[in-house]
Image (tube, coloured by chain):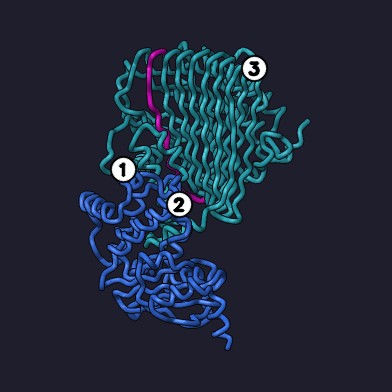
């Protein structure tokens, strides 16, 4: 993947889409038996989850976790300062951090009231996903992986989330969008669409491939792959 | 008569008492000793000690501590106290509020190293010099019951000296009193500190206890008893921060009586280090319209055993008690929580709440939690709840995936878990100190 690109990964249930996201972000209990993953020449698979994040990998969770007692803002400040320390930068002052947080909240349309609450505690499904995008905006990763960010979103929330992502797209970052449905790709238009089946990419095309999948389902690709 | 006769410590206590009895022939000591003789040291057959086997901790060859402090001891204590205070100051930078300082060494009041408030506000002296005080006669040996309590009986029979602290009527202190309990052990030592705190009517005071123990090869067993009398409309916020090392064993009984409109709040925090800790906290709500708060936090590690037993006796109407104990267990440590609430027949309109929550950070850690309610009144609000959970690994991964190190992530989660208790701490530097202690203990243990 190159900077500035958006890759969509689609595929039937059980194809390994979320496993791919887990492996890239370093979720425990996944063992990589073959292949390699490098980010700007660095071997990601050798790194702890936190070091991958510090190198610029971001996973927007399919099911963001609620952590009562940890405030959203304190959590983000800790994350940002640990990342800065990793890069040999001074920690952000409270003032700088607050200004940045305000700016990004506005950019991704994230409610200021939610920022001061406990991390995801009592958030609706849509609010949780928007919080993921807000974190993405704050942490400015090189590679963002959106794992079924559209699941559980109503159409308005889907629009807001997509709008946020589109604003964050630049020639310095790249996105992997994992989704079941073509719907999300109406809003976040990908450069490439890959079809994952049984843990392998069986077909790659442009954005029109998503439309074809929407119409015909996945079975024809599976058959094509077998033949 | 008893089945503990095989422990040599029991025998040694008997002969020690014979000697002591010749010197101090006091009724209260004799009664207590008879009780101890009957009870012996508890075994796990005793319901109160079911999950806590104290026998292995008693096997060492202890000597009863009865010596006077030498010049060399004092010099050593002075250094230990200085280092302890420096460490505290260091961790609460920017939070300084100041405190009076009261030094106890092996249960002996040490005036020369103490910095005490105005004597008109508070009277502080060695227990042995307080026998003519009126509150002494009224309360000493009358609050902490020896009945059925072997360790309390033993302390009452054989305590060496202790602390008498009486807050004058209507007095309000401008700063908390910081009691530093210093433990010295030149050989395996059995130390029995004894305290009597009297807070007279309308007075209010904050007491913070910390401890510092010389880390040597000798084992120190501390069997402490603190009696507390809180008069009408008096307020006592009592903090106990328990740190130590693996050669330290601690049994502490804190028993308080409260009068109308009074508030006694106890905050007991136990950190890794001390091999064995048993806290017995008992409150007697001896009037109507009063409140009690019991907050506990224990972070246990290694092979530590930390046991908290609480009792709240609601005897009159309109009493309120609030109890929240939280535990975080690491390694192969073990914790016990046993909370009893008694609501007597006359105690209508009582509000009594109890909550105990634990998280296990290790598969080898154990918690035994046992809430007990005995209610004899019919118009009361009482509740209790206990939870034991595991660290949420998905939450840990979530934090790590945002660039937060595993260590910091664990700290965040422990602090979040402990927050319900730590937010109750009224003295900001105490809260900061405790949070720093927790963070550094977690860091040490990875």
Taking depth in this image into account, of B271 and A151 the one nearest to the observer is A151
The letter of the blue chain is A
* Residue B121 seen anywhere in this rendered image of the structure: yes
User: What residue is pinned by disc 1?
Assistant: B92
In terms of secondary structure, where does tag 3 sit?
loop
Q: Earlier in the sequence, mark 3 or mark 1?
A: 1
x, y percentage for residue A109? 30, 52
User: What residue is pinned by disc 3?
Assistant: B378
x, y percentage for residue B389? 57, 48
Read off the chain for label 2.
Answer: A
Instruction: Determine the residue positioned at 57% across, 32% down.
Output: B280
- Contact check, label 3 and label 1, Cβ < 8 Å: no
Q: Residue furthest front?
A: A215
x, y percentage for residue B235? 41, 20
Taking depth in this image into account, of A185 and B89 the one nearest to the observer is A185
**Residue A43 sits in quarter:** bottom left
Taking depth in this image into account, of A144 and B54 the one nearest to the observer is A144
x, y percentage for residue B283? 55, 23
Measure the alpha-carbon separation of dots 3 and 1: 47 Å
Q: Residues within 10 Å of mark 1 (few under 14, many from 20)?
A: many
Q: Which residues are magenta?
A: B201-217
Read off the chain for label 1.
Answer: B
Comparing labels 3 and 2, the label whose residue is closer to the camera? 2
Q: Is residue A184 magenta?
A: no
The letter of the cyan chain is B
């Amino acid at each position: 993947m190159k900077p500035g690109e958006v890759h969509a990964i689609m595929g039937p249930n059980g194809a390994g889409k979320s496993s791919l996201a887990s492996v890239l972000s370093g979720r425990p209990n996944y063992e990589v038996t073959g292949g390699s993953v490098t980010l700007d020449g660095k071997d990601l698979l050798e790194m702890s989850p936190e070091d991958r994040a510090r190198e610029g990998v971001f996973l927007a969770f399919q099911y963001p976790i609620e952590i009562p007692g940890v405030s959203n803002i304190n959590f983000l400040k800790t994350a940002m300062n640990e990342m800065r320390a990793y890069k040999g930068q001074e920690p952000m002052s409270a003032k700088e951090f607050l200004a940045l947080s305000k700016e990004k909240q506005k950019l991704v349309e994230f409610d200021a009231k939610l920022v001061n609450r406990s991390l995801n505690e009592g958030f609706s499904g849509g609010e949780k996903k928007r919080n993921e995008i807000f974190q993405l905006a704050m942490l400015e990763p090189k590679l963002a992986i959106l794992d079924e960010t559209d699941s559980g979103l109503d159409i308005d929330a889907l629009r807001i989330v997509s709008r946020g992502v589109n604003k964050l797209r630049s020639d310095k970052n790249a996105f992997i969008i994992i989704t079941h449905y073509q719907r999300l790709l109406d809003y976040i238009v990908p450069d490439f669409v890959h079809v994952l089946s049984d843990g392998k990419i069986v077909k790659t095309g442009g954005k029109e491939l998503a439309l074809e999948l929407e119409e015909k389902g996945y079975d024809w690709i599976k058959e094509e792959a077998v033949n | 008569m008893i089945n503990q006769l095989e422990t040599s410590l029991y025998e040694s206590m008997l002969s020690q008492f014979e000697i002591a009895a010749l010197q101090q022939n006091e009724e209260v000591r004799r009664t207590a000793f008879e009780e101890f003789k009957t009870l012996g040291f508890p075994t796990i057959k005793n319901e109160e000690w079911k999950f806590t086997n104290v026998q292995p901790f008693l096997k060492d060859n202890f000597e009863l501590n009865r010596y006077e402090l030498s010049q060399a001891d004092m010099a050593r204590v002075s250094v230990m106290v200085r280092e302890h205070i420096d460490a505290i100051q260091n961790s609460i930078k920017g939070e300084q509020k100041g405190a009076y300082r009261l030094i106890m060494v092996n249960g002996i009041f040490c005036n020369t190293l103490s910095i005490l408030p105005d004597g008109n506000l508070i009277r502080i002296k060695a227990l042995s010099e307080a026998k003519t005080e009126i509150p002494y006669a009224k309360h000493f040996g009358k609050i902490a019951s020896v009945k059925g309590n072997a360790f309390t009986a033993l302390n009452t029979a054989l305590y060496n000296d202790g602390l008498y602290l009486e807050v004058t009527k209507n007095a309000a202190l401008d700063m908390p009193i910081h009691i530093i309990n210093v433990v010295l052990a030149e050989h395996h030592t059995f130390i029995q500190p004894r305290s009597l705190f009297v807070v007279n009517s309308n007075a209010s005071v904050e007491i913070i206890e910390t401890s510092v123990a010389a880390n040597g090869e000798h084992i120190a067993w501390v069997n402490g008893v603190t009696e507390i009398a809180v008069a009408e409309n008096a307020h006592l916020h009592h903090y106990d921060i328990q740190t130590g090392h693996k050669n330290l064993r601690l049994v502490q009984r804190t028993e308080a009586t409260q009068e109308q409109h009074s508030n006694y709040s106890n905050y007991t925090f136990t950190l890794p280090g001390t091999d064995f800790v048993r806290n017995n906290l008992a409150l007697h709500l001896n009037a109507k319209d009063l409140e009690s708060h019991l907050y506990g936090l224990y972070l246990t590690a290694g092979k530590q055993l930390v046991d908290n037993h609480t009792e709240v006796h609601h005897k009159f109407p309109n009493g309120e008690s609030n109890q929240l104990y939280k535990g975080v267990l690491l390694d192969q440590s073990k914790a016990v929580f046993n909370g009893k609430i008694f609501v007597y027949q006359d105690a209508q309109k009582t509000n009594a709440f109890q909550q105990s929550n634990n998280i296990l950070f290790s598969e080898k850690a154990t918690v035994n939690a046992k809430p007990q309610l005995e209610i004899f009144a019919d118009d009361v609000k009482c509740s209790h709840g206990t939870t034991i959970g595991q660290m949420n690994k998905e939450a840990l991964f979530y934090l790590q995936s945002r660039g937060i190190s595993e260590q910091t992530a664990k700290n965040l989660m422990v602090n979040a878990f402990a927050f319900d208790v730590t937010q109750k701490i009224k003295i900001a530097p105490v809260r900061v100190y405790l949070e720093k202690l927790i963070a550094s203990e977690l860091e040490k243990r990875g």
